Image: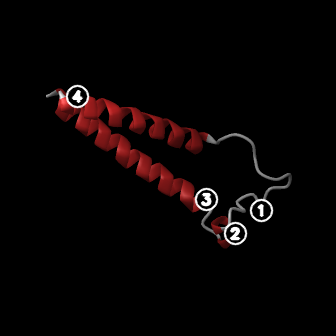
Amino acid sequence: MLAVVLLVIHTIIAVGLIWMVMQEMTKFAELGGAFGTGAAYTMFGRKKGLDTSGKITVALAVAFFIMCFLTSWVLSR
């Protein structure tokens, strides 16, 4: 039962992470974004820090990493 719950949570986190990464990719979809020049339209260069969607993406990535270990540990028992 615990394994099923963990797999469902793991799947939800994975889908959320995929969604957020795809949303982040649309920010740099121009031709300049392909070459790493996402800061072309800022006055003083690249902005510092992460915006809200960036923080959510990082949190989902950390949660996915932890859930990978937790799920594999529970399933191996």
Q: Kindly identify which residue carries mark 3.
A: 27
Q: Kindly identify which residue carries mark 1.
A: 40
CA distance separating discs 1 and 2: 8 Å
Marks 1/2 in contact by CB < 8 Å: the verdict is: yes
**With 14 as the anchor, is 27 left or right in this view?**
right
**Element carrying mark 2:** helix
Q: Earlier in the sequence, mark 1 or mark 2?
A: 2
Q: Is residue 19 above or below residue 37?
A: above
The N terminus, quarter of image:
top left
Q: Earlier in the sequence, mark 2 or mark 3?
A: 3
Q: Kindly identify which residue carries mark 2.
A: 32
In percent of the image, x 56 and y 61: which residue is there?
26
Give the mark toward the camera: 2 or 3: 2
Q: Nearer the viewer, residue 70 or 2?
A: 70
Q: Residues within 10 Å of mark 3 (few under 14, many from 20)?
A: few
Q: Amino acid at mark 3?
A: Lys
In percent of the image, x 49 and y 52: which residue is there?
21
